[in-house]
Every structure is written in C-alpha cells, then in structure tokens.
Amino acid sequence: MQTTPLLSRFLLAVSLTIGGGACAAGLDGTGAPSTGGDDASGVLPLGGDDASNDGDSAPFPSSAPSWDASAPPVSFDAGAPRRDAGADATSGPPRDAGADGPCTQPLGPGVLVIEEMMIESVAGSGDYGQWIEIASASSCAVDLNGLHAECPVGNKVRTLDVGEDVWIPPGGFFVIADSSDPAVDHYLPGTVLAWAGDPGSVLRKSGGTVSLMANDAIVDSVTWPALAVVVGASVAFPASCSPSQRSDWTEWQISTASWFPGFYGTPNAPNTDVSCP
C-alpha cells in the first residue's frame, strides 16, 4: 500500500480531558496519587513542585548523565516523519506499511498506549517543547489515519486529527508535540505529529487528561494527577513494568537518558532508561 509522504529530517547535536481548568486534577490532601488528582507530595518527588506551570526550575538529580559535547551527531531514521496537523498530504516521496504488512483490523482500543510525557521542557509559561509518546501494542503495522486526539486546557480543547496514512511499525512509537518546529520542540527524533495550531503549554503539572479516539471508540486515555516534575525531563512508564500498573503514578519515573543536550527522555524509543520500582 502506498501512503502519503511525510517530511523527514536529521537531529542536530548542537543546537491525555486536561486540566489547567475543566480537567484539572483535584487535591484530596492525602498525599496518595489517584486518577482524580492529588497533591504532589506522594508522586514523583524528585525536584519538587507547586503544581503550577510557572517558575519551576528544580535541579536534575545528580545521577543524571552528562552530555558529551564532543560526541558526533546522532542521526535518526531519515524515513521517520514529522508533520503538523495541517500538513499537505500530497508532497514528498511515498511511504507504505513496510515489510511487516498492515493490520487488517481498524484502529481500536488497546492498540495504542500513552506511556511517556514531557510536561515541562522549560520553566515558566509558553512552553512549546511539551510532548507525549504513544507506543503501538500491535504485532502489525498500524495506520493512524482517522486518529483523533484531544486534551482540554481551561475552556479550550486542543486537538489533533490525522487525515492521511501514517504508518507505525509493530511495537513502534510516535509523538504528539506542542509544536511542529524542530528548533522549538528540541529536535525530537522519529515520527512527530503536532496539536492543531502548534498551541504550546498543552500539558499541565496540576493534572489533566489526554484521550486518543478512532472509529467512535476510545483507543487510549491517560489522566494524571499533580506531578512534581523536573524541568527538561519527561515522566515515563518504565518498559519493565507490567501494563496493568500504568494507572499507578508512583510507578512512573523521571527519565535519565538524553536525546538532545539538556533534555532527558526517550521520545520514539522504549523507556529502558528507567526501572519499575
């Protein structure tokens, strides 16, 4: 099957309904994490936070790996696409499902799994470097055509609608970012989609929800509580944890691997840099 193309690029070495408002996680004061929200005292304690999205600059743990500025540029698959929600479906070389072949069933519940989030890439407001990573749990190539994602922010709902063929290989990944500009999203590698309009500041530390839908069904949805995040580091559900533990936010860990100088996470790659507690 031939599919519509996507733009590709190389990494440069130098250079889930959400809640700030309608979906904001509540505070029950018990310190125990829950999908309804909570204070940040019992969740991801590294760095500390006030559950706001402004003014946090918690230091990264001393065990974080340093970036070797002398290392040669690290390239990613030149065939891995990046696009915004309004990208032209008619440009570029064709892209198909690959050697693994396409899935014969439509996109449905359980096929895609949200398992990593960059909630605060930089301190303060106007953060365009946020992203969520979604993994395919399928053993065949998944076509994202028809996928709808949404994340309420206050009185607005940020959305993404895929209106063309975007193939994800078995066990593969893609990212939904706040911006489609590589210089702003810190040169995310691999398959990158963007919220319509490149809005920025979509994800909130105070809690929220991101939902993925297709064919009138929920494919996946994640609701997180207020989290004590580390600026410039994602929170990731470890690859070594059982999928049944994903709703337990004490299992999610601060990422330690770096894909770009000063930024920690494993976008479009397995979360093997963190371990299940």
Image (cartoon, helix red, strand yellow):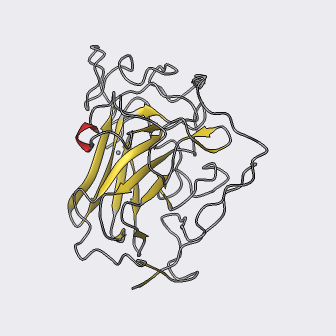
* 12 with respect to 211 (left or right): right
Residue 237 position within the rendered picture, expressed as x and y whole percent measured from the top left? 38, 39
Q: Residue at x 37, y 75 (%)?
A: 100
| Left or right of 138 in this view: 261 | right
Farthest bottom residue?
1
Instruction: From this view, report whether residue 9 is shown above or below residue 29.
Output: below
Instruction: Give the percent coordinates (x, y) of residue 114.
Output: 35, 48
Residue 246's spot in the image, x, y percent?
A: 29, 39
Which residue does the image show at 59% across and 71% down from the upper left?
7
Residue at left offset 39%, top offset 20%: 40
Q: Quadrant of the C terminus?
A: top left
Considering every residue shown, the one lying at the far top of the view is 30
Residue at screen point 53% across, 65% down: 83
Of 196 and 112, nearer the camera is 112
User: Is 29 positioned to the left or the right of 194 in the image?
Assistant: left
Among the 4 quarters of the image, the one containing residue 222: top left
Q: Is residue 153 above or below residue 107?
A: above
Vertical order, 171 against 226 (above or below):
below
Q: How many marks?
A: 0
Residue 96: percent from the left, percent from the top? Answer: 44, 80
Quadrant where the N terminus sits is bottom left
